[in-house]
Each structure stands twice: as C-alpha cells, then as structure tokens.
Image (spheres, rainbow, N blue to C red):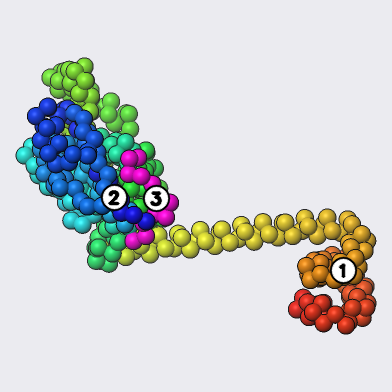
Amino acid sequence: MSEYQYYEFAAIDRPLTEKEVSELRKLSSRAEITPTSFRNVYHFGNFRGDPKKMMEKYFDFFVYVANWGSRCSMIRVPKRVLDRKQLKPYIDGEVVSLRQANDNIIVTFDAELEEPPHDWEEGERWLPLLRPVRDALMTGDLRPFYLGWLRAAEQGLLDDDAVEPPVPPGLGKPDGAIQALVDFLCVDTDLIVAAAGAADGTDPAGPSQRDFAAWVATLDDRHKNAWLLDLLAGQGAKARAEALQAFRKSKAKGGASEQSSCTTPRRTAAELLAAAESLRAERSVRKRQRAEKFRAEARKKHLDQLAAREAAAWREVDALLSATTAKKHQSAVALLTDLREVAARRGRVAEAQRRIDQFRERFARRHSLMRRFREAGL
C-alpha cells in the first residue's frame, strides 16, 4: 500500500480573507483552498505547514488521517465556553489535550491505531462527520472528553489505578456527532457500554425540558434578549453555548450537578477494561449459544426431512456406494451416518446397523471406502 496522508481544515466562525488565502497558498501549491477550507492529500513527502499554527491563526477545525493508523482532530472554540477546571480530570495529555491560543482553546484528539483498517477509507469523509463535535463542545457536552480518556485507557497510556473522570450523561446513547468521534478514535464499544452503566445499570439523561423551563423563568430580560438577538443575527450556536453555560453555572451554585457519577463510585482504568473484557466474553458465549441452537434446529429439520424419505435414502446409498468415485463414497458415508441417527430416534438402531454391515460385506475389498466407514464409526 502506498503512503497516504490527508489534511483538511475548516473555517467555521468566519471566512478567510484574500490575504489569508494567499498566505496559505505559500504553504502548498497543490492544496484545494477556499475562504472556508484547506484540503490536501500526500502520497509521498510531507506537508510544509504547521497544523497547530494554522489552527491558531486561520481555522476552527482540523482532521488528519494517515494510512498507517495515525488520526488527529483539532477543534478551536472560544475559551469562555470551556471550564478548564471541570475538564482537568478528563485530560490525559496523550489522546486528549488542550492549549490556549489568544481568546480560544484548541482541543486535540489523537489516536494511533494498532491495526489500521484493511478496507481503507479516504479521509474526506471525516470532517463533515466530526464537525458537529465542535457544537457539542460549545454546549458543554463532556462526552467527547470522556471518550478520549477511555481511548487513552484502551491504548495503555494510563496507569491501571487511574481513576475515571465523572461519567457524562448520555454516554451510552451517542448521537451522530459522538458516534463519529467513537469511530474516528476507534474507541472499543464494549468499553463504552461498561463505562456508561452507572451503579444501577442505567445511563441517566441530561437536564429535562422542565429543568430548562424552570431555570428560564428565573432569568431577567437582559440575558434572554441578548441570546434572542444573537439567534436572529445567525449566531444560534453562540447563543446556545452561552445559555447552556449559564444554566450549568446556576446549577453548580445551587449545589446541584449534571454529572451522574457524583454519587456513583469511580472506577479505575483496569476495572473498566476488565468490565469490557467481561462483556466481550458474555457476548461470545451468547453468539456461540445462538450458533449452536441454529445448528441444532437445522440438524433436526434435515433429519425430519430425511425420515420422510427414508426408504429412498437407503436406495440412494446403494447407488452411491456402487459408484467408483471417492466423492460419491463420501456422500454415501455421510448419508449412512444420518440414516443411523434417524433410526436411533425411532428405536431401530440395530436394524440400521445390520443394513450398514451388509454394505461393509459387499464392498469389503474397497479399502479406501472401508477406511471412510471406520472413520465415521459405521
């Protein structure tokens, strides 16, 4: 497989100026550059630009994919929408990291896949799928950060006794954005299921409409009017992010918390990995049991059908054994095995065995056929 590296940037909050597009063109003569995007593919060599600096100066979203398993996404959001103190337990510094750039924070998700996908998928598909993750971060969704922590645990980047951060509501019920990040980072789904189950085995939801309605009723017109004006000006994401941030702060001041795991015992990385392994083992057992049940049902149906034509089947055996090809002899032995089982179901094993012994006597000089009889226990 030839080398493949895919770079894509997106400007979301504002388009690039002509001057900025010209500056970017100096970094690559082959890149596809528009006022809202920068895209390039490398099959040899490397990109001359620095994605980190480009994110600081020009873009709000970045995706990098290489066919040897490296994946990276950087997301720039206004620093006012993130509470770095709240995020501290989730940041491992390997899979998930933060850095401040002026009035923004750049969130980085890195993953190194041990076994890159065999059916290689081009990098173009990832940014449209992951782009809603930025909206999730802007509205205070902590699931992306928790997923990064899980991936770090899965990659062995955390100590076994590292304690998990608070489990965000809705972890076990991913929407499109969260599922895209799960796929991009290749987080083990069993590990997510193990993590999502609270002490009582449920995955609590976030605040309800009733919770929001009660809070909105306490707001003064100044805040509501400001958010409404932002909405009318086409800045709905900004208005929603600020409103949800204010909601969370009000709950924190009141002593409440959206985090379900405040009352749930925290688990270690080793405990979560063991729980995921247990889920895999249970699923494997269930899969094997289903397969065994399917085979048993298919076997019963086959024997029922054979019983309905038993007399004809014995004549078929005679014809197959009288032939001289090994393939027909093999079919005859398989049919005899089934006929003996049909006889056993009817309490006529001795009768079936007498007929089998007659065949053995007739074809005793065919040594390879007799070997097949012995191997089949006939």
State the image coordinates of residue 139 (x, y, percent, origin top left): 23, 35
The type of residue carrying mark 3 is Trp
Q: Dividing the image into 4 quarters, which one contains the C terminus?
A: bottom right
Q: Is residue 74 left or right of residue 367?
A: left
Depicted 36 relative to depicted 301: above or below: above
Magenta span? 114-125
Residue at the image position 87 percent from the left and 59 percent from the top: 307
State the image coordinates of residue 164 (x, y, percent, origin top left): 26, 57
- Label 2: few (<14), some (14–19) or many (≥20) C-alpha neighbours in 10 Å: few
The type of residue carrying mark 2 is His
Label 3, label 1: how far apart the Cα atoms are: 50 Å
Q: Which residue is mark 1?
A: 323
Considering depth in this image, is 175 or 132 the residue closer to the camera? 132
The type of residue carrying mark 1 is Ala
Residue at the image position 81 percent from the left and 67 percent from the top: 328
Q: Is residue 361 left or right of residue 244?
A: right
Q: Dividing the image into 4 quarters, which one contains the N terminus?
A: bottom left
The answer, for residue 167, to whether it is visible in the render is no
Quadrant of res 337: bottom right
**Is label 3 or label 2 in front?**
2
